[in-house]
Image (cartoon, grey):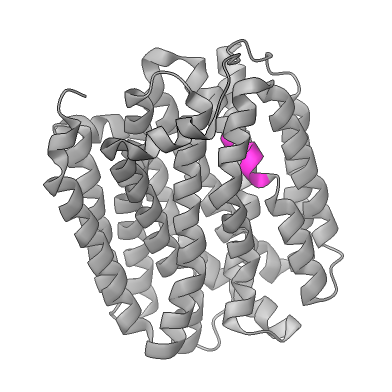
Amino acid sequence: MKNYTLLVVMLSAIVTISSIYITQPIHPLFAEIFGISIAQVTLFTSVVLLALAFAPIVYGYLLEKFDTRLILTTALTYIGILQCLLCFSQDYTTFLILRILEALMIPAALTAALTTLTRLDSKNIQKNISIYVASTVFGGALSRIGSGLITSLFSWQTTFALLGVTTLSVAFMSYYLPKSDKLNSAKITPKIFIDFLKDKRYALLYMGAFLVLFCFQGALNLMPFEIKAINPNISSAEIGFLYTGYIIGIITALLASYITKIAKGALNAIILGFIIFGVAPLLMLIKGFWWMFFAVFVICIGMFIAHSVLSGFINNIQKEKKGITNGLYLAFYYTGGTCGTTLPSYLYEAFGWEVLCFVLSGILFGSAWLFYAYRGIFKGV
């Protein structure tokens, strides 16, 4: 049954992450057909990330009290139906409202999937989380590449319909997962969340989660507009092709345990991830399609080293309260994603691509320094 659970969690992560990023390669197309600005079109992604910034804390609480399987199945069914309904949107307002409704359940699916996995085998948490992260990477790559390709070959409506049907199929599979047997009967109060954040170790790790997705979204969400400015005739399929660098992220996530050993510890691996990631925005300063393509590979190597090790490390520190631990992690992670999707767009429009790249690189190198400077708080972990 463990293998079936792992398979369903992987598929759940893939389709849920795909539902977040499916719009990204076709943002320029939506801006054109709906007649909206760059800031408006990025809301299709940022509203989902905003929900992910807050809802995982609520769902983390619910997952300590209620059956994880029921929450996962309900969430996936809801997402699948809304993906299908998006095909019928005729205007910007309708599309955005449906995305907002979808955003309410995406955090439930991701938090339930991750919590199911961390409860599956306490002896192999880093390995299982690496598989989960690799699944989310695959979902991100599949949605971006597939969205651009299918939209170019058929239509954007076809893209959403295919994902909707697939998500409903995974929801059916999730119904046959075993029921949760590790529910927490103790009273959970806001003080528990505050105690997590007062611990300097968790505060630093959650900050790292925030910054890693902030910079990731800041670079990749605006990349289609920059490449479109360089080459106005570029197609949605070609823009989607730029995201094939995500493939290296799958390998990187699966090798997280090995990379941690080579780096001689989780903290060193996290610092390494931030440094590699910090180099990527500087590479994106070089004009040209293929330089941008190469930079995405570097971004994904650095980002998924940091993300995989961060999420595994924080679960190794906290042996209990997995729902809350993962809910807070995802909340900070996607708060960073929300800010990274929206705020850099204003920086980009005001000062241009070059300034944006330097700012993102500075944040990443600064993060590496912070983890190095405060490494002493993790002694004994």
**Relative image position of residue 304 (x, y in whole percent):** 36, 46
Residue 159 visible in the snapshot: no
**Relative image position of residue 154 (x, y in whole percent):** 75, 67
Q: Nearer the viewer, residue 174 or 161?
A: 174
Q: Which residues are magenta?
A: 106-111
Q: Is residue 150 left or right of residue 211?
A: right
Quadrant (top left/top right/bottom left/bottom right) for the C terminus:
top left
**Residue 187 vertical placement versus 29 (above, below):** above
Residue 225 visible in the snapshot: yes
Quadrant (top left/top right/bottom left/bottom right) for the N terminus:
top right
**Relative image position of residue 97 (x, y in whole percent):** 78, 64
Q: Nearer the viewer, residue 184 or 180?
A: 184
Residue at horizontal 73 percent and vertical 38 percent from the top:
75
Residue at horizontal 58 percent and vertical 16 percent from the top:
184
**Residue 146 vertical placement versus 239 (above, below):** above
**Residue 233 vertical placement versus 118 (above, below):** below
**Residue 207 vertical placement versus 265 (above, below):** below
